[in-house]
Image: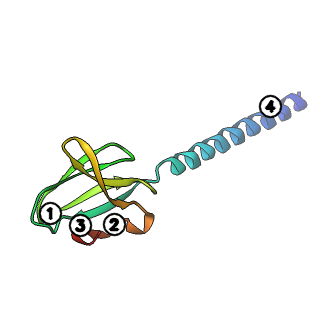
Amino acid sequence: MKKIIFISIIALTLISFNSSSNAISKIEKLELVSEKFDIKIKNDTDNEVKVINAGSGGSYSLTKGATTTIKMEEGDKLHYYEKGKKGALILTASKDMHGKVQLLSKI
């Protein structure tokens, strides 16, 4: 009887240990997937400009004088968006741009 109780306790301990290690693995995987960061672009030009994120496919209007935040991943490319087509390259996203304001006239 003592052996059955002892084996049951060990089995429950191993099951709970295995469950918690799986949960940790899932959390680590989730962190690796979500590596997006914010790039802020201030349109300091005289015109409204449309841009497209070639990584996600999202398009944005950069209003004259306003700062727009765009979520991007490392290596995503931001292009001008002209007449429904991808235009000239504006920038390639890097982590060192996170949270910093990029002036459109300087990039």
The amino acid marked with disc number 2 is Gly
The amino acid marked with disc number 4 is Ser
Q: Which mark is residue 55?
A: none
Q: Assess whether mark 1 and mark 2 are in contact (beta carbons under 8 angstroms).
A: no
Q: Quadrant of residue 63?
A: bottom left
Q: Which residue is mark 2?
A: 99
Which label lies toward us, 4 or 3?
Answer: 3
Q: Which residue is mark 4?
A: 8
Q: Quadrant of residue 21?
A: top right
What residue is rendered at 86% in x and 28% in y? Answer: 4
In which quadrant is the C terminus drawn?
bottom left
Secondary element under disc 1, as helix, strand or loop, is loop
The amino acid marked with disc number 1 is Ala
The amino acid marked with disc number 3 is Leu
Say left or right for 81 vs 76: left
Lower sequence index among marks 3 and 1: 1
Lower sequence index among marks 1 and 4: 4
Q: Colour scheme of this structure image?
A: rainbow
The image shows residue 1 at horizontal and vertical percentages of 89, 27
Secondary element under disc 2, as helix, strand or loop, is loop
Looking at the image, residue 96 lies above or below residue 88: below
Lower sequence index among marks 2 and 4: 4
Please rate how many residues cluster around mark 4, counting C-alpha atoms within 10 Å: few if below 14, some from 14 to 19, many from 20: few
Please rate how many residues cluster around mark 2, counting C-alpha atoms within 10 Å: few if below 14, some from 14 to 19, many from 20: some
Q: Assess whether mark 2 and mark 3 are in contact (beta carbons under 8 angstroms).
A: no
Q: Assess whether mark 4 and mark 2 are in contact (beta carbons under 8 angstroms).
A: no
Q: Which mark is residue 104?
A: 3
Q: Which residue is mark 1?
A: 66
Q: Assess whether mark 3 and mark 4 are in contact (beta carbons under 8 angstroms).
A: no
Which label lies toward us, 3 or 2?
Answer: 3
The image shows residue 12 at horizontal and vertical percentages of 74, 34
